């Protein structure tokens, strides 16, 4: 049998095989194929009969002579088993019969999945997970497929594989998307069958996964307005949960803190979706929670501009679960009203001796309903000062900032002043001005002395002067007197700088308003105008002086000064005059007696002075002062230039809190004179009783207990016995019960809210701060009582009473717990101090900061005052700044200026290492300097010296010492001059030290690259000669080991010394000049390149020099002189790089060579001997050329011989 074999890729696949029948004869013949039978082997090896799967498509035909015919068989299998079919090929004409066995075998198509199982593990219900697998066809035929698997709910499928059917192209792969969406909390297991058409076997995929549900708890703790009760607010998913940030200020941060708990069995991821909002943030914005964990999430509202939002939704996504949080809030600019935000002083006269040329007051009003912190960051300049301090403005409160302009030069000024609101929001205020000179002058030089004349009382003298303004701008001025005269005026009116009352203050204000008038009134001189005069440029003003004396006075001379606003007063003119007459005056016009006890009296003295030249008689009109006052003597005589004492007695006859008699006149020579009267005031109070005392003593605001006994001797019980205490500094039970025939102990507590005076000081004033926080209502100046007093009263049912006098002494409060603060040098540390207000009314505290030691480099600052609402607390911000490391003890005392009560904090600031300042990258090549500058500010009142520096990198240098002026700054230069190549180094520490200001530490980033070739040296010479040049380089070696350099050249054409030694230089210098000789001796003609490397044996770096040599053909040398009958020697060097044989010849027979050949070693020398024997017909001398040749060189060496 002939055998034809088929292999089919699966069943129902049509397979064909072709072959040829050849007719080698010269005759045509016909052929036919006859089917004889078919059999199939089962899986058990047995053969059975089946339909024939084979078919001959060319069952008969004719084969032409010498040609061939194509035979085609087809195999279409229906089963997987091996099939055999028997056929016979017949040529009847030739009687030829050939048997053919056709075997058909079904082969499994190589169609597979890239993996047979997928495990999605744990998945949230409703979540979606996707995996991609590939169906691979490794055959050359395409195959179609269909996916089959069962699901519980086909409308809501858990597993989806797409595409579910299709065709896989030949020798390719297609991706399949497997999507898993768990619908219930259970374990899923799917067996997916892939039905590959014409593939007998199945392709299977196992998919597993487990669904779980998210159990989350989102809650928010919300406090009521009192802040005492906190309610938990649990937020629900799939519902709208509302939160309100309220109203905040621009640049202020509001936080709502939520807690998120994973109450489920599996971890979950969460993420906040805030939309496009730029003023909202979530911290953290996303995260992962393990089983049972709780995360704190802060919703932050911070806006740098005004914004308002209502019901703004944000979302917390936890897998398929979503929380909707609806937010409301508003950020607004603080309603601070600035009286102006741009102010120009305009042209102003140059300031002298610290007196401002112009000033203005900026008023800031808090129109908010809450307190606002306000601070000004402006540093006073020589030409502009602003009195400012950090403060807290209560609602409706205002603050004034005096702005003073001190122009120092004739130029224009402009400054920007920044006000910081609530520590973040800034408001700019522009201040401008110009400095100009002042020129005011009298029109007449003779007006410098104004003589009013010597006249009698009642007469009048008038003088007029004119003053011109020659300045660029208007001048505002008035006339005044010297400072010494003002002091005499105050002394004359009995005004003391040490003791001032309301009357004195009023009189002083009147004097200072127009001191010249006050002074000239003594001489009965008036002038006009008395107020400030504003004189425009090139204008004149008339001043009129009127002398109208009403009393005698000796000759006088008074200097009159001109006081220009912002300038030091200067002398303008002198007034002179005289008058003769009489006069009198009292040393005071008010006699206050204050309160005295009923039935007592008090005597005070008034002085009456005769300032005239004749004696005077006086009499008091006493009808209006009875019955509470008496004046003795009521009349009398005062000699000239003398004074008498008048006694005024106060003896009230009835209780009265306000006894007053206004302007009791004193007649002089029976005439009423101005200012000759006095006003009498006083009060009459009741005397206080005393009884048994309970004495208490403790620090202020700390309780102390005492016990008293209440005894009931009656046969009846005392129920609800009332207890009365008339001072709130003591407290106890309001009612007690005392059984019959027994005794009860009663506890009374003393907790003072104010201190008492020192031993022996003060009076018996009640605790004024009970009502108004400590301000005494009966006096403008608070007087602390020497003791606190009260009464404990038991009203007994039997008509009697038990009364205890209570007396307490409250010492200074103990300081609060000591606070230790650790901080870094040269960085402001903000420390908050919580100050409590123990009263039911607001308190304003003056703040005193005491810094231990005398270290001027330590700065401790804070607001000078603090307001605390009633029964609440407020944080005080203390700023600490230290230039040097160390420990500083600070005491901060908050004192009520009215009551002198205080709260004291003790703090210990431990300043550690200085905060490093990061400087920009310093990048350069080696030996090329890079310099940057850095300012160092000196806050001290004395100059400081930056004395040293240290750095981890030897390439860094800082020139020291550097002197920094007081309150000024100096610039240090940081020089980077690397000597060796190094990659970028970050965090290189540079420390610059000052004994007064400590260390300044900088973090440097350094990078040193190669310098490349420093220079190029070019040499030109001829073969057999040398060229020598000197290379100069600068060495920056600071140590002897670094100053040793090795010289190296790889080639042999150039030579240098192997080592060279440079001078040792100081760090930061310009280096030492060092020289190296380079010799070029070529061994062949043409060009050559090489590199000279000079490298330090230490750390001083490396230099590279490019060497370029050019060699020409040998040049003629000579002449070589040879005397007749003698010889000469030429020294010839083999400059070639190998041993060479040379041939010598000379073109004149008068010269004879010692040898004509020689083999010379490389770089070695040979001596050539030449003898001279002249011929008889020689002209007296001979010349010739000595030629030296070798096979390796085409050009000879020529020596001229004579």
Image (cartoon, rainbow, N blue to C red):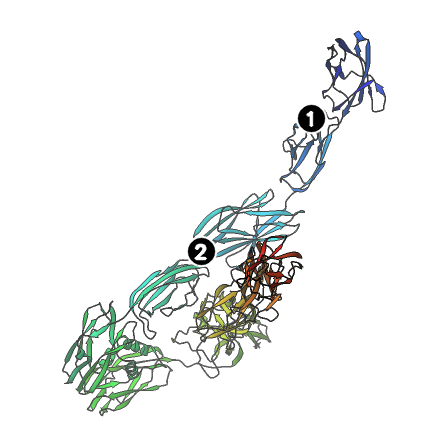
Which one is nearer the viewer's eye here, 169 or 474? 169
Q: Dividing the image into 4 quarters, which one contains the C terminus?
A: bottom right
Q: Secondary structure at mark 2?
A: loop
The residue at which mark 2 appears reads as 250
109 over 275 or under it: above or below: above
CB under 8 Å between discs 1 and 2: no
Q: Quadrant of residue 1008?
A: bottom right
- In this view of the protein, can residue 189 be seen by the observer? no
Q: Position of residue 1157 (x, y in %)?
A: 66, 58
Give the total number of marks visible in the rendering. Answer: 2
Distance Cα–Cα, label 1 vs label 2: 73 Å
Q: Secondary structure at mark 1?
A: loop
- In this view of the protein, can residue 525 be seen by the observer? yes
Query: Looking at the image, which residue is at 66% across and 50% down?
Result: 291
Q: Dividing the image into 4 quarters, which one contains the N terminus?
A: top right
Q: Position of residue 113 (x, y in %)?
A: 70, 34
The residue at which mark 1 appears reads as 141
Q: Quadrant of residue 65?
A: top right
Q: Residue furthest top?
A: 93
667 over 301 or under it: above or below: below
Q: Quadrant of residue 4?
A: top right
Q: Which mark is residue 454?
A: none
Query: Looking at the image, which residue is at 47% across and 57% down?
Result: 252
Q: Position of residue 42 (x, y in %)?
A: 83, 22
Q: Residues within 10 Å of mark 2 (few under 14, many from 20)?
A: many
Query: Which mark is in front, 1 or 2?
Result: 1
410 over 140 or under it: above or below: below
Q: Is residue 123 left or right of residue 457?
A: right
Q: Residue furthest bottom?
A: 639
Q: Position of residue 221 (x, y in %)?
A: 56, 54
């Amino acid at each position: 049998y002939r055998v034809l074999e088929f292999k089919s890729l699966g069943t129902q696949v049509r397979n064909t095989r072709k072959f040829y029948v050849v007719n080698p004869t010269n005759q045509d013949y016909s052929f036919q194929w006859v089917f004889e039978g078919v059999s199939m082997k089962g899986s058990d090896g047995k053969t059975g009969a089946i339909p024939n799967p084979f078919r001959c498509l060319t069952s008969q035909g004719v084969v032409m002579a010498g040609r061939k015919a194509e035979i085609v068989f087809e195999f279409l299998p229906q089963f997987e088993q091996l099939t055999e079919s028997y056929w016979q090929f017949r040529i009847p004409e030739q009687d030829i019969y050939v048997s053919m066995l056709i075997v058909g075998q079904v082969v499994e198509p190589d169609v597979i999945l890239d993996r047979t199982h997928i495990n999605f593990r744990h998945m949230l219900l409703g979540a979606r997970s996707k995996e991609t697998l590939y169906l691979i066809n490794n055959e050359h035929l395409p195959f179609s497929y269909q996916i089959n698997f069962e699901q519980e709910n086909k409308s809501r499928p858990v597993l989806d594989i797409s595409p579910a059917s299709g065709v896989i192209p030949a020798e390719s792969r297609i991706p399949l998307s497997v999507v898993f969406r768990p619908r219930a909390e259970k374990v899923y297991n799917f067996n997916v069958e892939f039905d590959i058409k014409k593939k007998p076997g199945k392709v299977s995929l196992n998919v597993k996964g487990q669904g779980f549900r998210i159990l989350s708890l989102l809650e928010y703790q919300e406090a009521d307005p009192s802040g005492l009760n906190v309610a938990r607010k649990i937020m629900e998913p799939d519902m709208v949960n509302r939160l309100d940030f309220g109203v905040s200020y621009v640049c202020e941060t509001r936080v709502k803190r939520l807690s998120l708990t994973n109450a489920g069995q599996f971890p979950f991821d969460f993420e906040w979706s805030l939309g496009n909002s730029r003023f909202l943030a979530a911290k953290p914005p996303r995260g992962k929670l393990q089983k049972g964990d709780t995360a704190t999430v802060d919703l932050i509202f911070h806006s740098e501009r005004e914004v308002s939002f209502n019901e703004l939704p944000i979302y917390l996504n936890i897998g398929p679960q979503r929380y909707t949080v609806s937010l409301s809030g508003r950020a607004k600019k603080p309603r601070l009203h600035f009286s102006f935000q741009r102010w120009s002083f305009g042209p102003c006269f140059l300031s002298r001796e610290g007196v401002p040329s112009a000033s203005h007051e900026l008023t800031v009003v808090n129109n908010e309903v809450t307190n606002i912190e306000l601070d000004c960051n402006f540093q006073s300049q020589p030409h502009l000062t602003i009195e400012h301090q950090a403060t807290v403005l209560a609602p409706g409160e205002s603050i004034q900032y005096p702005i003073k302009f001190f122009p120092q030069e004739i130029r224009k000024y402009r400054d920007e002043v920044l006000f910081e609101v609530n520590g973040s929001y800034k408001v700019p205020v522009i201040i401008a001005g110009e400095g100009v000179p002042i020129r005011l002058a009298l029109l007449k030089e003779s007006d410098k002395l104004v003589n009013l004349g010597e006249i009698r009382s009642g007469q009048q003298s008038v003088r007029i002067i004119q003053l011109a303004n020659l300045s660029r701008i208007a001048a505002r001025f008035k006339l005044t007197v010297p400072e010494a005269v003002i002091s005499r005026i105050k002394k004359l009116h009995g005004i003391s700088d040490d003791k001032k009352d309301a009357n004195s203050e009023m009189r002083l204000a009147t004097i200072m308003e127009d001191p010249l008038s006050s002074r000239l009134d003594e001489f009965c001189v008036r002038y006009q105008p008395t107020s400030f005069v504003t004189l425009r440029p090139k204008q004149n003003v008339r001043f009129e002086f009127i002398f109208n004396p009403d009393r005698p006075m000796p000759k006088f001379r008074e200097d009159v000064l001109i006081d220009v606003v912002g300038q030091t007063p200067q002398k303008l003119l002198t007034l002179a005059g005289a008058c003769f007459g009489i006069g009198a005056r009292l040393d005071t016009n008010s006699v206050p007696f204050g309160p005295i006890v009923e039935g007592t009296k008090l005597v005070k003295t008034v002085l009456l002075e005769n300032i005239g030249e004749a004696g005077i008689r006086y009499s008091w009109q006493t009808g209006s002062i009875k019955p509470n006052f008496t004046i003795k003597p009521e009349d009398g005589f005062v000699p000239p230039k003398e004074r008498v004492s008048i006694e005024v007695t106060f003896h009230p006859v009835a209780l009265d809190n306000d006894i007053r008699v206004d302007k009791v006149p004193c007649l002089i020579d029976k005439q009423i004179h101005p200012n000759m009267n006095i006003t009498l005031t006083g009060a009459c109070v009741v005397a206080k009783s005393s009884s048994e005392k309970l004495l208490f003593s403790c620090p202020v605001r700390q309780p102390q207990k005492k016990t008293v006994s209440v005894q009931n001797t009656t046969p009846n019980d005392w129920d609800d016995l009332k207890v009365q205490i008339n001072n709130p500094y003591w407290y106890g039970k309001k009612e007690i019960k005392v059984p019959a025939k027994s005794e009860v102990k009663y506890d009374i507590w003393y907790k003072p809210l104010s201190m008492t005076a020192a031993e022996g000081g003060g009076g018996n004033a009640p605790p004024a701060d009970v009502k108004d926080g400590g301000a005494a209502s009966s006096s403008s100046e608070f007087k602390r009582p020497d003791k606190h007093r009260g009464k404990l009263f038991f009203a007994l049912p039997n008509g009697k009473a038990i009364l205890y006098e209570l007396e307490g002494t409250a010492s200074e409060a103990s300081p609060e717990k000591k606070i230790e603060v650790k901080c870094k040098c040269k960085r402001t540390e903000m420390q908050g101090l919580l100050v409590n207000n123990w009263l039911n009314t607001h308190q304003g505290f003056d703040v005193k900061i005491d810094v231990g030691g005398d270290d001027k480099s330590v700065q401790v600052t804070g607001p000078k005052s603090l307001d605390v609402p009633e029964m609440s607390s407020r944080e005080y911000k203390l700023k600490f700044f230290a230039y040097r490391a160390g420990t500083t003890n600070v005491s901060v005392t908050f004192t009520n200026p009215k009551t002198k009560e205080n709260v004291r904090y003790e703090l210990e600031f431990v300043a550690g290492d200085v905060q490093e300042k990061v400087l920009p990258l310093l990048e350069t090549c080696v030996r090329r300097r890079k310099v940057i500058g850095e300012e160092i500010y000196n806050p001290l009142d004395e100059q400081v010296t930056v004395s040293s520096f240290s750095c981890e990198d030897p390439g860094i240098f800082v020139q020291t010492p550097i002197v920094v002026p007081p309150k000024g700054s100096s610039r240090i230069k940081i020089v980077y001059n690397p000597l060796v190549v190094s990659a970028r180094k970050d965090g290189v520490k540079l420390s610059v030290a000052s004994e007064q200001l400590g260390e300044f530490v900088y973090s440097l980033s350094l990078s040193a690259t190669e310098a490349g070739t420093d220079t190029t040296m070019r040499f030109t010479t001829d073969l057999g000669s040398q060229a020598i040049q000197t290379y100069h380089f600068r060495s920056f070696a600071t140590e002897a080991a670094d100053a040793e350099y090795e010289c190296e050249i790889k080639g042999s054409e150039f030579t240098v010394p192997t080592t060279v030694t440079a001078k040792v230089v100081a760090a930061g210098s310009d280096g030492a000049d060092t020289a190296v000789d380079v010799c070029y001796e070529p061994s062949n003609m043409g060009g050559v390149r090489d590199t000279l490397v000079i490298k330090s044996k230490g750390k001083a770096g490396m230099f590279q020099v490019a060497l370029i040599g050019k060699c020409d053909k040998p040049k003629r040398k000579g002449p070589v002189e040879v005397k007749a009958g003698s010889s000469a020697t030429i020294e010839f060097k083999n400059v070639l790089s190998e041993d060479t044989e040379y041939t010598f010849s000379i073109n004149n027979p008068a010269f004879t060579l010692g040898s004509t050949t020689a083999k010379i070693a490389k770089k070695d020398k040979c001596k050539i001997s030449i003898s001279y024997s002249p011929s008889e017909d020689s002209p007296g001398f001979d010349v010739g050329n000595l030629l030296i040749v070798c096979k390796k060189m085409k050009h000879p060496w020529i020596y001229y011989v004579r």
